[in-house]
Amino acid sequence: MDITVRGIRIHVSFLFVCLVALYTLFTPTPDSVFFLLAVILHEVGHLLAMLLSGELPAAVELRSFGIKICRRQTFLPPLRELLILSAGPFVNLLLSAVFFAMGKGFHNAAMMNLILALFNLFPVGCLDGGNILRCLLELRLPPYLSQIISVCVAAVFLLLFFAAGALIFFGGSHSPSLLITAVYLTVTLIKDISG
C-alpha cells in the first residue's frame, strides 16, 4: 500500500503488517505495545533530526524487517549525517531513562528501549552504529578508506555475533534468535557492499 503525505511517499508492505500482527499476537500486550512504540519513536527521532537539519525524506517504507527512511539527498555533510543517525538511538536511551525513573512497572519498557538503542549502535553498516562509524571515519579519512575500515569492523563484529549465537544455541538454551539476527545482518551487509 502506498500513500503520499505532503510529498512524502509512505509505503506499507503486506509482510510488515503480517509480522506486526504475529508479534502482537504472540507477545504479552503491554510488552508488544512498548516495543512497537520504541521502534516507532526511534524512527521519529531520525525524522525529527532530518526536519531540523532542513531535509525532507523522499519516502518512509515499512518493510518486513523494519522501517526505512529514504532520503532525497544522497550526500550530507558528516556532522549533519551524524546528528540524524544518532537521533534514533538517543530517543531510545532517553525513553529508557524515563521508563526506569517511572518505577518497576515500566522496567520491561525501559529494557526494550535500552536494548533497541544498543542494538542499533552495533557497528554494522545497515544499523545506525555502522553508519555512525563510517561518518566519524570520513571526518578524517577519504570515503573509500572509511568504507573499507567500516566493513572490516563489521566483519569482526559479525564473527563475534555468530560465535555468541552458536554458543547460546549449542550451549543449552537452543535459542536461534542471535544466529538468525547475525545471518540477517550479514546478508544486509553483503547487500550494502555489492549495491
Image (cartoon, rainbow, N blue to C red):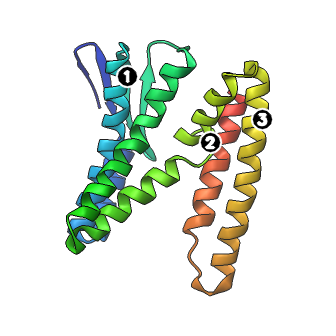
Q: Picture quarter containing residue 127?
A: top right
The Cα atoms of the two marked residues, 2 and 3, are separated by 17 Å
Residue 127 visible from this viewpoint? no
The residue tagged 1 is 50
Q: Earlier in the sequence, mark 2 or mark 1?
A: 1
x and y percentages locating residue 37 in the rendered image = 26, 51
Which numbered disc, 2 or 3, marks the residue closer to the eye?
A: 3
The residue tagged 3 is 149
Q: Earlier in the sequence, mark 2 or mark 3?
A: 3
- Whether 124 is drawn above or below 149: the answer is below
Describe residue 185's horizontal placement relative to residue 64 as left or right. right
Q: Amino acid at mark 2?
A: Thr
* SS at badge 2: helix
Circles 1 and 3, Cβ within 8 Å, touching? The answer is no
Tell me which residue sits at (73%, 29%) in the image.
Answer: 147
* SS at badge 1: helix
Tell me which residue sits at (34%, 16%) in the image.
Answer: 56
Q: Picture quarter containing residue 33?
A: bottom left
- Whether 166 is drawn above or below 94: the answer is below
Q: Residues within 10 Å of mark 3 (few under 14, many from 20)?
A: some
x and y percentages locating residue 24 in the rendered image = 27, 62
Circles 2 and 3, Cβ within 8 Å, touching? The answer is no
Q: Amino acid at mark 3?
A: Ile
Q: Residues within 10 Å of mark 2 (few under 14, many from 20)?
A: some
- Whether 124 is drawn above or below 50: the answer is below
